[in-house]
Image (spheres, helix red, strand yellow):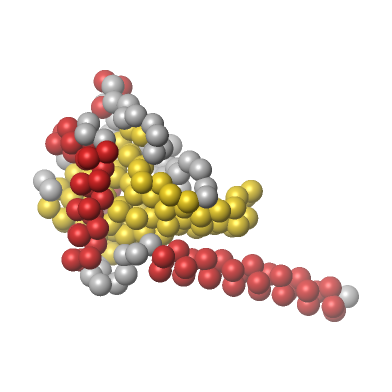
């Protein structure tokens, strides 16, 4: 009995240690260290340039938006339990106004790791102010994806453009397929 209980505690301890290790690895592996706002801004600029070059229609989305949250590199990993982490900047009129971190946890049948970038386009003033007022905003199913795969074309139509928040996921690399932002929590940080 004692041996069985001890092995359960060991497995539980191992699982918690593995989760903590995966979180630290994801945080370190996203390439955006704690060098402050200049590092984050440089990565945001590079991600935007890459998105604009790969998907030219996003330029008009950016011009029509009231603000954009740019997360230049999200690292996501999972083995049964998973997590994702990254840092980015909120831009209004092409000027950084705040810095944010994105954190996501998940459980279920999963294995692998991936990295990707994403941009949230706030298409209304209400959506942007609601995001900025929240102490921790979570992405939900009400968000419309403009595209979310390396190979898919940008899909903007009159229905999509009336959505308050549009998401673009790009530059996916790794062993997992299909990044989704649902369940990702964004919190304001001081770099």
From the top left corner, tell me how far across and down residue 53 is, in percent: 22, 40
From the top left corner, tell me how far across and down residue 96 is, in percent: 16, 55
From the top left corner, tell me how far across and down residue 137 is, in percent: 35, 51
> Taking 98 as reference, is 65 above or below it?
above
Query: Is 179 displayed left or right of 117 in the figure?
Result: right
User: Within the image, what quadrant is residue 64 found in?
Assistant: top left
Question: Which residue is pictured at 36% across the width and 42% down the height?
Answer: 169
Question: Which residue is pictured at 46% across the width and 70% down the height?
Answer: 24
Seen as rendered, the residue at the extreme top is 158
> Taking 55 as reference, is 79 above or below it?
below
User: Within the image, what quadrant is residue 164 found in?
Assistant: top left
Question: Which residue is pictured at 32% across the width and 26% down the height?
Answer: 155
> Taking 93 as reference, is 100 above or below it?
below
Query: How many badges with numbers are in the image?
Result: 0
Seen as rendered, the residue at the extreme right is 1
The quarter of the picture where the C terminus appears is bottom left
Give whichever of 67, 43 is nearer the camera. 43
Give whichever of 96, 172 is nearer the camera. 172
């Amino acid at each position: 009995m004692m041996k069985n209980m001890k092995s359960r505690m060991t497995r539980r301890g191992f699982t918690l240690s593995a989760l903590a290790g995966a979180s630290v690895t994801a945080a370190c592996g996203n390439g955006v260290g704690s060098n402050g706002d200049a590092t984050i801004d440089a990565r945001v600029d590079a991600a935007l340039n890459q998105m604009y070059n790969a998907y030219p229609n996003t330029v008009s989305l950016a011009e029509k938006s009231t603000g954009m949250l740019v997360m230049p590199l999200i690292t996501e990993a999972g083995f049964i339990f998973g997590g994702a982490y990254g840092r980015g900047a909120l831009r209004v009129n092409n000027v950084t106004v705040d810095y944010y971190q994105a954190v996501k946890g998940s459980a279920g049948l999963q294995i692998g790791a991936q990295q990707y970038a994403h941009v949230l386009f706030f298409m209304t003033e209400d959506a942007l102010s609601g995001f900025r007022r929240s102490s921790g905003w979570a992405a939900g199913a009400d968000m419309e994806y403009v595209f979310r795969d390396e190979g898919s074309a940008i899909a903007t139509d009159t229905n999509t453009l009336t959505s308050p928040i549009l998401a673009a996921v790009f530059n996916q690399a790794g062993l997992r397929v299909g990044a989704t932002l649902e369940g990702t929590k964004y919190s304001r940080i001081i770099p």
